[in-house]
Image (cartoon, rainbow, N blue to C red):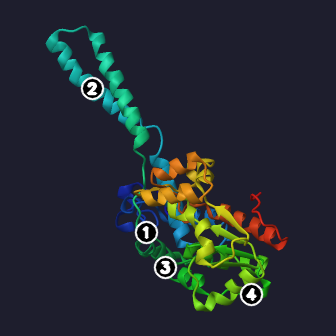
């Protein structure tokens, strides 16, 4: 790793006790001691890249999502190791059998080919889902110690601030609302507020279950027929929100509701490194509801049946912000469809 103070390249034995042997200054993150193999400069570069040099406000959950995406991208791919292991084990076992039975050497090719076929089949059925450290642990072991040493960037929002921001009353008058976002994620609602989208576009972001303090804004959405955009994770629960919003928010059946995503096709169309994929056990009842109440294509339903989940915090912040800005502009113009971000 590179020393964050003198920029000397340090081997492991040259940085014992988290101290640079060249300049004798201490650093915070030892790559061999954390799950993400992060060092001080690496975290700084990641934060600058995600925030586009401080122009986008981030939540700690989005930083964690970016690291999990990177971890997943390094793990996914063609399982060369499995094929090599299958070849060695099969060749060894059947080599012994060939020698014992005095069979021709080319007979070993057949079991090796079968081993490759079985390995390929298993590789398509087994997918990697990264181990999820708790957000509080990630903050306490990585973000807060690093921030204490170098100063926390003003555009980085910790989880306790995220909760406070997401629970705030909307910052605009109910009659000034142009766009209503239903989003279950407190971190994404905080992201919307922190990046001043309410002020710029008359946008409010509310949870599925409204509290008494938020009721005046929801009443204005109903009475003024403000378009409601449902922003959700790609999951069985998430994809059903577009259907459930009418009951949750007591909207009339003809109220304009638009599915912003993310949906399975949004994930299938992007590069793997641009989304985070998790695995859960699929619920058969939810699968039936998705097939009954949504307009998802068969390929999308199959994707959900496999237990795939793509959380919102796994989206790159710049991509999420571009989606929301495009929608904010559409809301100002009175559109009831969501244009694609440029």
Q: Position of residue 323 (x, y in %)?
A: 70, 63
Q: Position of residue 45 (x, y in %)?
A: 58, 62
Give the residue at the far bottom of this rendering: 213
In this rendering, the label closer to the viewer, 3 or 1:
3
Disc 1 to disc 2, C-alpha distance: 53 Å
Point out the image quarter for the C terminus.
Answer: bottom right
Nearest the viewer among 297 and 163 is 297
Residue 90 marker: 2
Q: Position of residue 264 (x, y in %)?
A: 58, 53
Packing grade of label 3 (10 A; few <14, some 14-19, many >=20) is few
In this rendering, the label closer to the viewer, 3 or 2:
2
Residue occupied by mark 1 = 24
Q: Quadrant of residue 225?
A: bottom right
Mark 2 secondary-structure assignment: helix
Residue occupied by mark 3 = 148
**Dot 3 or dot 1, earlier in sequence:** 1
Residue 174 marker: 4
**Residue beneath the point at 57% across and 61% down:** 239
Mark 4 secondary-structure assignment: helix
Packing grade of label 4 (10 A; few <14, some 14-19, many >=20) is some
């Amino acid at each position: 790793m590179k020393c964050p103070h003198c920029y000397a390249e340090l081997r492991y034995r040259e940085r014992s006790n988290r101290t640079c042997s060249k300049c004798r200054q201490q650093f915070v993150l030892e790559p061999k001691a954390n799950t993400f193999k992060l060092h001080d400069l690496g975290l700084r570069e990641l934060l600058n890249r995600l925030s586009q040099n401080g122009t986008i406000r981030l939540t700690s959950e989005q930083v964690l999502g970016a690291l999990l995406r990177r971890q997943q991208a390094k793990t996914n791919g063609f399982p060369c190791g499995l094929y090599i292991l299958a070849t060695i084990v099969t060749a060894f076992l059947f080599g012994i059998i060939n020698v014992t039975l005095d069979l021709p050497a080319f007979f070993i090719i057949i079991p090796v080919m079968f081993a490759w076929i079985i390995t390929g089949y298993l590789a398509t059925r087994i997918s990697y889902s990264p181990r999820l450290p708790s957000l509080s642990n990630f903050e306490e072991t990585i973000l807060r110690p690093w921030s204490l040493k170098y100063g926390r960037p003003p555009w980085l929002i910790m989880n306790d601030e995220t909760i406070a921001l997401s629970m705030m009353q909307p910052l605009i008058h109910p009659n000034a609302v142009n766009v209503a976002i239903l989003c279950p994620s407190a971190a994404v609602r905080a992201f919307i507020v922190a990046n001043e989208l309410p002020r710029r576009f008359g946008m409010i972001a509310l949870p599925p279950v409204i509290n008494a303090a938020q009721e005046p804004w929801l009443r204005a959405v109903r009475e003024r027929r403000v378009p409601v955009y449902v922003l959700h994770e790609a999951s069985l629960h998430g994809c059903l929100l577009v259907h459930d919003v009418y009951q949750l928010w007591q909207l009339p059946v003809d109220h304009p509701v638009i599915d912003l995503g993310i949906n399975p096709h949004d994930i299938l169309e992007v590069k793997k490194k641009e989304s985070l994929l998790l695995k859960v056990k699929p619920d058969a009842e939810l699968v039936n509801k998705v097939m009954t109440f949504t307009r998802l294509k068969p390929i999308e339903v199959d994707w959900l049946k496999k237990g795939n989940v793509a959380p919102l915090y796994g989206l790159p912040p710049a991509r999420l912000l571009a989606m929301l800005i495009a929608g904010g502009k559409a809301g100002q113009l009175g559109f009831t469809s969501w244009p694609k971000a440029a």
